[in-house]
Amino acid sequence: MSEKITALDLPAPQLSDATKAYFAKCEEKLGLVPNVLLSYAFDEKKLRAFTDTYNDLMLGDSDLSKLEREMIAVAVSSINHCFYCLTAHGAAVRQLSGDPVLGEMMVMNFRAADLSVRQRAMLEFAVKLTEEPAKVVEEDRQALRDAGFSDRDIWDIASTAAFFNMSNRLAAAIDMRPNAEYHKMAR
């Protein structure tokens, strides 16, 4: 690894066979091992906690589509100005939507995008939870129900937004850098 992934000088990882296999699967499916995973690799327990949570939120059972979950990641990361997540998840929105313009609008200002009422309600909730969590009230949850979301969906929206708020703060604290490949994806 010649490129600097974070500003921290953490110990070189001693990867288990399971982690090596996981990284090989990432390389096979994505063409890269995301730097976020490499940044956690110094401590396999932390890496496992991160990947288990991420995989559950972003790939697990949910009535939210993969695109909707990625849109939440980008909207939250846009508010937080998280370079890593905007780059990586902006690429995911471009790929999943097949629309590079949507991916760029999501990164810059989701409100400029031509979104469904459902998507707009979802993102407004995620942004409010990011900017003013103490001001989230029943009317905000009801607005999601009115847009067609179930209470389980509200849980998924909130937990996805919360996860990316945590990830954004860690990425900012350690100056986590995105893989260069993300900049070229789905353009």
Image: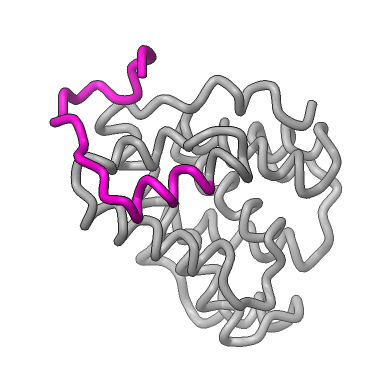
Front residue of 176/147: it is: 176
As displayed, is residue 48 above or below residue 151? above
Residue 40 at x, y percent in the picture: 28, 43
Asked if the stretch drawn in magenta spans residue 63, the answer is no
Q: Can residue 78 be seen in this view?
A: no
- The overriding secondary structure of the stretch rendered in magenta is loop
**Quadrant of the image occupied by residue 87:** top right
Please state the horizontal and vertical placement of residue 86, each as a whole percent of the image: 55, 35
- Residue range (magenta): 1-25
Q: State which quarter of the image contains the C terminus.
A: top right
Q: In this view, does 70 lie to the left or right of 114?
A: left
Considering every residue shown, the one lying at the far top of the view is 2
Q: Position of residue 167 (x, y in %)?
A: 37, 47
State the residue in front, 112 or 86. Answer: 86
Tell me which residue sits at (41%, 66%) in the image.
Answer: 135
Q: Residue at x 67, y 36 (%)?
A: 91
Could you say which is closer to the camera, residue 85 or residue 151? 85
